[in-house]
Structure formats: C-alpha cells, structure tokens
Image (spheres, rainbow, N blue to C red):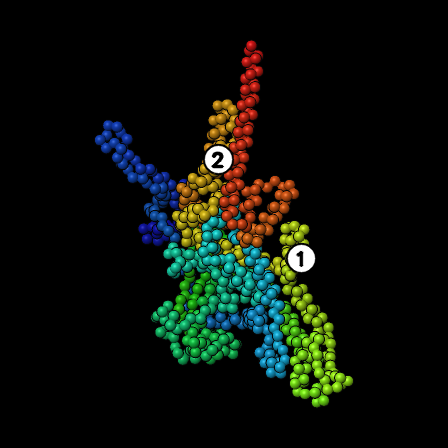
Amino acid sequence: MLLKTTKDGTGKGHYHIVYLREQDGMVSESRGHSHEIQYMPGTPEQYDTSPDSPSVGMKIAEATQPSWNIIPYEDHTHELTEYVTQSTQKREKEPDIVKDIISLYEQAKKNEESSIEDAHECESMYQHKQWDPEEKKTLEGKDRAALTINKLEEKMDNLSGYQRQNRTEFRFLPTEEGDQKVADILNIVVKNITEQCYFPREETKVFEDAGIVGRGLFNIYDDYDPPADINGQIVIEKFPWDECHFGPHEKEDLSDCDYVIKTKWFPLIKLKEMYPEKTKHLKPEVMSIEHATRTKSEDWDTSHGKSEISAGGSLVDKTNKQYKQLECWRKIYRTANLLINANDGFVFNADGWAERDISMVTGMAGFRSIPRTDFDMRVTKVISQVLLEDYYPELAYNDFHIIPLYAKKRKNKFWGKIQAVKDIQKLINKAYSQFVDILNKMSAYGWFYDDETFPNRQEEANFKKNASAPGFTQKLRDSKRPPEKVEGVKFPNEIVGAIELLSRDMREIMNVNLEMMGMGGDQQSGIAIRQKIVQQLLGNDFLFDNLSFAKQKLGKIIVALIQKLYTPERLKRIVLNQNMREPVTIGGATIDTPQARQKMQAEAEAEPMVQGRNQGQQQGQRQQEKQQERLITEQAIEELLQNQDLTKYDMITTESPSSPSAMLSNFMFLLEIAGRGVPIPPTALFQFAPIPNKEKILAEIEKQTQMDMKRDKMKYDTEIQKSLIAQQGKGEQGMM
C-alpha cells in the first residue's frame, strides 16, 4: 500500500510517501533525504506457563499487531497516516446546472428526433393504426373500404414467440483469477434474482420493443423501498423506449456516450410529497404550457449558449397538473494516474493525488506513472426550472444503468424490423380495400322485368324472394317473356396477383418465415427441424446477437450489485434454499445433506468389495476420501464466502438455455445421438427433459441403477466365493 507521513516537527514542514510491502518498505525522498523503515512483526497473546507460578495459565501480555517504524534521520522522524485526497468537483450555481440539463435534453431529443418519429409510426402500425386519419375519413365518406390487414403483427408475434421458446439464463464462468465455486454460487444467486423480478418476461418486452421500433431498454437498480428487502434488492425491468434520450454515440454498449436522460411525468401532488421544500419554488407563470407533447426547436431560446423554457415546450402539462422530471446521468471526465511497480505487480489509482506526491512515488525504485482518462458518474434531477437533486452516487458498477438493445443502429439513427416494410403494409391495405370495392361493383348481377311480366304484385314479390334459390317455380303472365338475368363482370385476377406479390415481398424483407414449420413430415429428425428453424430465421441473427451483447453488460452490473448488497450469510441462505428445491453443485461437490450422504452410501455399498484385509481397508479409505471430495458442508460454504473477496473476481458472462422449448430441443438432440450409439447415461439425458416431476424420475432411475449395481455386486461376490472355494478344494487335494 501507499501511505503518507505526518510532517516533521522541525519547522520545515516536509513529509514523505511510504510504500509498504508485506515485511519491508520504501520511503520517498523529500528535502534531500529519506528514511529507513523497519517492519515490526506482531506477537501472539502470552500466558504464564511456569508450573510454580501462582498465576499459571493467566494472560500476561496482549497480542500486538504488525507495525512499521520509521527510523529517525538526523533530528526528526515521522508517523504513518492515510493519504487524504482532495475533491476535484467544482461548485456550480443551481440556475446554471438547470440550464445545462435542459440544454442536454434538447440536444438529445434533436439528435434522436427522426428515429423516434419513425419508431412511433412503426409502433402505431403494429397496433393496427395503419391509415392516415384524413385519408380513411375521406374513403369512408365515399362509402369505400379502408381495410387493415395487419401482417406486421403476425410476423413480430412469430419472432417474439421464437425468442420466448428459446430463452436463456445468465451463466458465469471464472477467469484465470476466478474460482469455480464462486462462479457456481453466483449462478445460483443470479437465478434467484431474475426469478424474483420476473426477468424472462421483462427481457421479452425489451426484445419486442427492439424488433418493433428498433430500441428496447433494460433498467437495473438496487431497491430499498417496501416491499423490497431492507438489505436491498436488485431489480431488472423494461424501461419505456421513448422516455430515455441519449447523447451521441455509435457503440451499442454506450461506452462512447457522455450522458443519458431519463424522463418521467409526475403529478404535482406527488412532487409535493417527494420534495416538499423544492416544489414550493415552482413558479406558476413558467408552467403555462397546455397539452405539450413534443419539443420543437423554436420552443427554445438557445442564444448565447443558454436554454430557456418558453410557451410550447414539453416539460409541463398544466391541464393535467403534471411535470416532466429530467434525470440526467453524466460522465464527468478527469485525468487520473496509475502508479505501477512492475517488480511487485502493484497497481494503484492515484486519483486526486497532488502532482508533487506522484513525483515522489515515481522517484522510488521500480515505480512509474501512467496517466489515463477516467470519469465519475453524476446524477442530476430537474423539474421545470427547479433543481431537485445533484450528486455523485456510489455505484457498484461505474457506468450507465440503462442498457439499450438495438435492432439496427448507424451513427445516430436506429430502426427495427417494421421500418423497412411500412410502405408495403400500406399498399397491402389499399390493395385489399380496392379488392373489396371492385368486388362489390363488378361481381353484381340482376334481373330485368316490366309491369307486364308478372300477373300480380304477389307473384312479383315471390320472384324477388326466390330468385337466388335453386329449383324455384314462378308464375308469369306470358311464359315467352320471362325475366332477363344480367351477369356481372368477372373479377380481374391481376388484383389477386398484386396482393400475393406484396405479401411475398413482405416475407422476403422481414425474414420471418415460420409458416411452413409444421409441414416437414413425420420422418424429420429433431436436429433437422431445429436446423430448418435456424435457417428460416437466419436474417434475424443480428437481433438475437445484440440481445446477448446487452445481457453480457447486464450480467456485469448484476455481479457488481451482488458484491455491494449481499453478505456471505445472505448468499449462503439463498444457496441452501435453492438446494432444498433442487440439488445444486458447487465446484463439482454436492451440499452435505442426509439425502446426499444416503445416496453416496448406497453407491459405495453397490461397489464390488475387493478381497484381502489390506485391500479392503484401502478401498474403504478411498471411498471416504471420495465422499469428502464430493460433499461440501454449510460451514465450508460460509468460510468460502467470508474468505473470498468477490470484488477480485471478474467473471465471464455467458448464457445457457432455460426455456422448456430450448431444453426440449437439446433433449431431442441428445436422444437422437444416443439412438445412434453415443453412450449417454439416462440421468444425463433426463437433465434436459422439460417434464414435470423430473427429480422423482431421476431418483427412480438412480434407485434402479443402485439396485442393478447391488445385484451385479452380489453376482460378482458369488463368483469370487466360488473361485475361492474351488482354489481351496484344489489345495486340500494337493496336500492329500
């Protein structure tokens, strides 16, 4: 570690920087001199051990901690102390902070304006709103059809259904510095967290947003409000895609994004409850905006680099007494220095250190300084022109906690699956509407007759009633002058062909073609069906790949929040509760329970016993050692969590299938290759079977396996006994 010394008492007022190793250290030069430093090992508690002493067994000296002693130089010395960094955060006036946030909000909305406008249209079309209101009103006024044949919803539902049936769950793997046991515990805990916040459903909603409008948003945070756990609960939820605005960025993980602004409407009554002191400063004359729905460039006075609210803005809805809160997350950049001693593998972040002190460190042997750019996250909340909060949060993971899932993104433009087929969908609606209009006009037929055709009004009425019925009879005045039928014009097949062409174009452009999945025949294997589905969705791999990319960052934040919120006792409790529902393994070992011991004992009894006393003892000892290796106690789990610093482990975030459909696909694959001769144990096969009461089936299989092993053991022992009897008989005959 790096520490600082106190100033000396000679009046010169100098100090040193001290580098401490395990049992030695170095002191930097200052005022042309340095000091030697001496390591003083600690001592244990001492007790009176003299048998003749009246205080035998009593403590005579307390334990001492290891320490370092700075050797005096000439006429002075120093004491060790912590290095206190100076804050580099500059102070700003509240009005200036508010103006900055509103200006950033304006820039972000302008930056995404075209994408959001297109996205809203795509969402409306998905929701069956596919006609221009004026055009539809005009057609209906002329008694013409304005049909909506929504093919977009069908395509997006197919894509969403495929994602639902192939959901994956987080899976963590250790890096070189990691521990498989820690990774297994994280997997159990994260599964518990995602179940508590219904993450699979939230994930699907985010996926649907990305497919429809081009962007979905995950929001992750630690919650302490009721009914959350008082120790903190990790929440992962879908955030409205159009209520968050981003600074310019090209990288989908926001690594090149400088700020994110979340927005939310609050009623005045709730604001008064949340910020009673702040809301009394809200000025009614500023809030004179009614039914504002969007921000226009002319709504803002941007002269001299400032932004002011004026009539027509979108931060206040006076009619509904609602106010839009802007919650801005900004990266505040700063230059930091890393102090590195390559000989010891020591790396220290000297953020906030004075340049003079950094120079003293680099003057010591083996040290060098590497400057780098770092940032602090700053959160600012604004309502109208009032600053509600402005602070630097203590984040477990120093980054934005809004994680976007983009379908397609180029520079500042994003779009989804519907964007490319909006015009085709509109043409399909018009073609079907024209189809109906033409059908109504061209398919009509009728009859010509005059006043002399029928003998009376009653017969005329009978004709009108029965003209379309087969085999009717009709009385006429003169059978030589029957009513004359007029056929309608045949419907043009070109209209039907145009509709089929448009539907085919939509299928090709959207690349969601699952309609023929059930027509492969009964002889197709599970592998072939799976491969066919993958081929049909080949054009959508980018969307699933982007989902995996977003979940990787999400997994890193989850691990960081676990390190912040979860104590070893809490982690152990979650692991044990999960083990009660379904047995888990940690580092390849089963948690030590009576059921686990019974299972292992049965397996040991089923093993054939070797002959000979020494060999039998060795076999028993090996079985005990094997049992200890395959079991992990609750105490061992607690000690592991207390001794291991989870913050030192950088886990790799991957995915594994969790949905019944994905598990069934894997089960069918294993079943098929097992049928081709690959030796797969039944227990391993049933691990992937998406069936109820799977644990009971596995228990029965294991029970039957143990019975078979016992039967084989008895048969083996019988053969051994026969051999021994036969050998004994031969020996007796030889003696005779």
Q: Is residue 268 visible?
A: yes
Q: Is 605 above or below relative to 535?
A: above
The residue that disc 1 covers is 519
Residue placed most toward the observer, 178 or 600? 600
Residue placed most toward the observer, 725 or 474? 474
Residue 274, percent across and down? 37, 68
Q: Is 653 above or below relative to 599?
A: below
For this orientation, the residue located farthest to the bottom is 451
Q: Which residue type does callout 2 highlight?
A: Ala
Residue 282, percent across and down? 38, 75
Residue 311, percent across and down? 46, 80
Q: Would residue 634 be found to the left or right of residue 467 on screen?
A: left
The residue that disc 2 covers is 602
Q: Would residue 175 be found to the left or right of residue 463 on screen?
A: left
Viewer-side label of 2, 1: 1
Count residues near mark 2 (Cα–Cα under 10 Å), then give few for <14, some for 14-19, many for 20+: some
Q: Would residue 75 be found to the left or right of residue 637 on screen?
A: left
Q: Label 2 to label 1, Cα distance in Å?
A: 49 Å
Q: Secondary structure at mark 2?
A: helix
Which residue is at 50% across, 78% downward? 299
